[in-house]
Image (spheres, coloured by chain):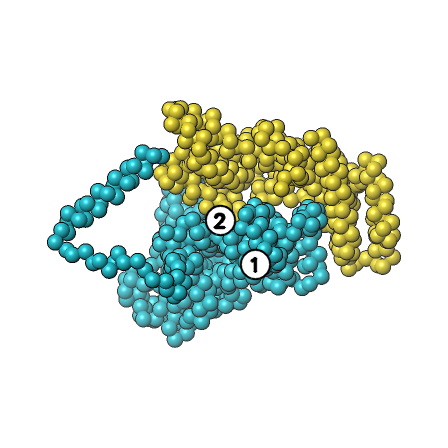
Chain colours: A cyan, B yellow
Amino acid sequence: MLSLFEGRKRRVEDNISAAIQGAPSQEIDKSLFAPAQYDEQASEKTGFSNYSYWRSTFNVFFHNRMAITLLTVLALVLLFTFIQPYLPGQYEANTVYNNPVTGMQLQNQSPSLTTTYITVPEGTLLMGSAIDDNWYAVTNVALTLKARQAFTLLEYGEDWCKIEYNGVVGYVKNNFQTKLKLPADPTATPYESKSNFPISVYEEPVDYTNGGEPLYAEKASLRETGDGKVITIKETALHSIPSENPFLFGTNNIGQDLWARVWSGTRTSLWIGFVVAFFEAFIGIIVGVVWGYVRRLDRLITEVYNVLDNIPTTIILILISYIMRPGIRTLIFAMSLTRWLGMARFIRNQIVIIRDRDYNLASRCLGTGSVRIMMRNLLPYLVSVIMLRMALAIPGAIGSEVFITYIGLGLPVDVPSLGNLINEGRKLISSASLRYQLFFPAIVLSIITISFYIIGNAFADAADPKNHL
Amino acid sequence: MVKYVFKRLALSVLTLFIVITIVFVLLRQMPIEGYFDNFEKLSEAQINVKLANLGLTKPIPAQLWDFYAKLFQGDFGTSTRYSVGTSIAGIIAQKAPLSIQMGLMSMALSLLMGIPLGAAMARSKNKFWDKFGTVFIVFINAVPAAVYYIFIQLYGTDWMHISLLFDRTNWITWILPVFSMSLGSTASYAMWLRRYMLDEINKDYVRLARAKGVVSQKIMMRHVFRNAFVPMIQYIPASILYTISGSIYIESLYSVPGMGGLLVDVIGRQDNPMVQTLVMLYSAIGIIGMLLGDLLMAVIDPRISFVKKEGAR
């Protein structure tokens, strides 16, 4: 200790002598060393720091590049959910869309099918007829044979067989669906054959249909050649619907637009998340602070908590959905009613940790009221952890909406939410081509929850004064 | 210590009593339509007969009295809707072993994965393992379990060329459910262990040990890990006991005939005796698990004592 002091003393002396040597010619201003007069104003002057808690918090937060990126993503998603219905060419979330020509529901059209189903080269001859001013329904099916209709098989192939019927030469598919009747050696052509099912005869060994239904092409890329035929004058994309506006995310199993449903669902889920998180924080913080700070109530509230915590949420959810009409409000009410418990317990534990710190004892000794201590001494100290909990409460609420839907107590299907979209998609996973109906809502959901989680953590870090510089 | 345990047990019995009574009363507020499969087709007389059979026509206090009288004779009653006439103890005894087995396996797996991951994260702060672990933890915590469970099932079964469903006799079909179940707790074990270990690493005794020249490996194992694991040990008994409740998602995704979702299922079907028994079982497990956890912590770390707690400050 002594040597340390000696060291510092020596350093100070060195500095002084260096200063004197470095500026030998400068006259020392004597007035600086004159004894000061007593000045009332100067004695009131104190140390000043321009530290501001929230400014520092935002400063630290905005230096976290990951959080800023995700915040931007989240803001864009949020903005997009609101402007999406007003964009041109959008479909309705709850309208069932039919194929305008056949009147069939556009079920399970995967996104790749609705944009460009298939591309045909220039100069392809197709059967075609105009359905309106801009669109033609086209197909390359020359004719359809009735079941058990005999025809001559000219050339056998693994996928396509060349046949002749009534003077028309065409191709039929050779697969388990067409079940062509074949002799022992099918390559020894020609011979009489038939199918037990109605089969389509194509002009070329290629299928320009949507599972038998016609496809649609724009008028501009076609030229009529008479007798119901058209020829493509350039490379042409055939669509499964006669519209420029594809179903971006495809359609679901009753022909609703998944794109519109996903965004409408995102809107619902975010709304549920925000409102439930707000109530969760509001009730949870009030109860938690009282529980933690007021000693006389500690035992009582702990016991009440133990009781409430052990009542299954499902019973409460079912009872509420029985009492109130199923809908977003009911769900929000039911979730708020059950989710504040965890928050209250968390806040209580935090309060218990800091309630007997010396600054609070001092406050209490000076006669500060309990409410003021809670509001002024305790809560500001907990801002960062409360922020974290709130940011996590939003993805938590969204996730629990998924869970509630999963156990069958969620929103009705005509109120799309990410929860019931995922649940609908989940039922179709056994068929690989329909999995997109699960992917899209799941991806949007994951982006939202991960963003909230990371932003929440970053903000909690930023709100902790220990990380302020 | 013994006095403390008894006091807490007595309090737990009281809590349990209140929980069951509240649940009992809540269940009696359920719509009576729920007790019938074909409510619309029945005449009023038929409905009344069935309600009387279920014991629902008596006033609620009388029903409650009957229930407790039976309970004290050790009779949990029979299922009224889920599997009519079967004894509830029988149903649980039939379903629970599978859930417990699966739960214990997944718990062992998550300890096996979570602890090394957490320790590696704490040792390599801001290096590869820490970053990898953080991404993993963020993903598991942020994405709802339903979503990644489905994807694991989807691609896991494709990849292993097995059926989507669980088959008790085929051990390969155990892998995916057990693995999926373990992910959540792996993430939380890793997260907390990392946190506690970093707290310990910054303490003075570790610095002293390092200054003395104790090998880093030894500091980590003998000092840091042992101290960091104490707060985590508290939750182990509760986790072990809770394996009986199974996992709703996993068991319904893979069609595992276990306890998962049984409570939700019987609440939905308004099988009152079963709901009551299951609520009682799960509450008791929660309370006992918490108590065992506290005791275990006191046994492992002699500095922790619950007896003196009231005297402090």
Q: Amino acid at mark 1?
A: Met
Q: Crowding at label 2, few (<14), some or many (≥20) Cα neighbours within 10 Å?
A: many
What chain does badge 2 belong to? B
Please give the residue where the numbered disc 2 appears in the rendered image: B142
Which residue is nearer to you in this view: B273 or B169? B273
Along the line of sight, the residue nearer the viewer: A135 or B183:
B183
Callout 2: SS: helix
**Which residue of the protein is positioned furthest toward the bottom in this rendering?**
A133
| x 81%, y 35%: residue | B74
Quickly name the residue at label 1: A375
Which residue is located at x 73 percent, y 40 percent? B12
Task: Report the mark closest to the observer, 2 or 1.
Answer: 1
Q: Quadrant of the C terminus of chain B?
A: top right
As helix, strand or loop, the secondary structure at mark 1 comes to helix
Task: Report the front residue among B159 and A156.
Answer: B159
Q: Residue A28 sits in which quadrant? A: bottom left
Residue displayed at 29% across by 37% down: A6
Q: Quadrant of residue A228?
A: bottom left
Provide residue A171's location: percent of width, then percent of height. 38, 53
Q: Is residue A293 above or below residue B283?
A: below
**How many numbered circles are shown?**
2
Residue type at the position of mark 2: Ala
Asked where in the image residue B170 lies, by quadrant, the reply is top right
Alpha carbon distance from label 2 to label 1: 31 Å
